[in-house]
Image: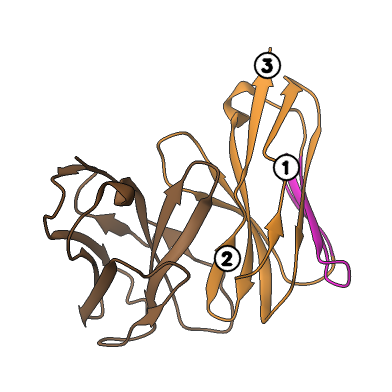
Amino acid sequence: DVKVTQSSRYLVKRTGEKVFLECVQDMDHENMFWYRQDPGLGLRLIYFSYDVKMKEKGDIPEGYSVSREKKERFSLILESASTNQTSMYLCASNQATGSLYGYTFGSGTRLTVV
Amino acid sequence: GQNIDQPTEMTATEGAIVQINCTYQTSGFNGLFWYQQHAGEAPTFLSYNVLDGLEEKGRFSSFLSRSKGYSYLLLKELQMKDSASYLCAEGVFQKLVFGTGTRLLVSP
């Protein structure tokens, strides 16, 4: 089974800190995604990547950046954390075929910015 | 982004049948997906429809009508453990776009 691992389950950071959220997948998937999930808003796509060193903005990229130096790792960066970035962050990956079957999520990182 | 609508909350009784509807506005349609998410956990895959019709998988079935931009998830013989959020998602090119989810509460 494909495994998507997010390095932290819970994280508490201070306003203004630079925050790194790490995601690693072990099935050689080309595509990787970062979502945030908030009550009443559902999952919203922040950034995604179709290949190493490639990135595309999702629906809510403001305040975030990403890094994909290796195929298996996709990092989400909060340059200067703010309280409105308190949320559940979910990473996902899938193969770059025509079908999206097999889109798999990590267990999530619940980030609190104080 | 795409507009995906599903009810916010539903309640049902153990042993009953419940249908959760989802409508979407297609753009680069690449399948319709249903995920289950228990509180505090990641979404887990339930079903996938890319052609019109009904897909059955044990107690869960999912239906798709592409011409109407409509899908539903049918849960039979409800169990307490089915209390969760159910997320409808449209495949748009190479990514999934999600609705806000339907919270299902199953009572004894």
Same chain for labels 3 and 2? Say yes or no: yes
Q: Nearer the viewer, residue A98 or B10?
A: B10
Above/below status of A66 relative to A85: below
Q: Which residue is mark 3?
A: B107
Label 2 marks which chain's residue? B
Q: Quadrant of residue B4?
A: bottom right
Amino acid carrying mark 3 in the image = Ser
Label 3 marks which chain's residue? B
Magenta region, mostly helix, strand or loop? strand
Tell me how far mark 3 sits from mark 1, CA to CA. Answer: 18 Å
Amino acid carrying mark 2 in the image = Val
Q: Which residue is mark 2?
A: B97
Can you give x and y, in whole percent of width and height, for residue B66 in the image? Answer: 83, 71
Give the residue displayed 35% in from the left and 69% down from the top.
A62
Q: Which mark is first along the chain, 2 or 1?
A: 1
Give the label on residue B7, or none. Answer: 1
Residue range of the region highlighted in magenta in the rendering: B53-74
Q: Which mark is first along the chain, 2 or 3?
A: 2
Q: Look at chain B in the picture and name its colour.
A: orange
Amino acid carrying mark 1 in the image = Pro
Q: Nearer the viewer, residue A46 or B40?
A: A46
Asked whether residue A58 is in view, the answer is yes
Q: Which chain is brown?
A: A
Q: Quadrant of residue B69?
A: bottom right
Query: Is B65 positioned to the left or the right of A11 in the image?
Result: right
Asked whether residue A108 is in view, the answer is no
Can you give x and y, in whole percent of width and height, for residue B14 in the image? Answer: 72, 19
**Element under label 2?**
strand
**Element under label 1?**
loop
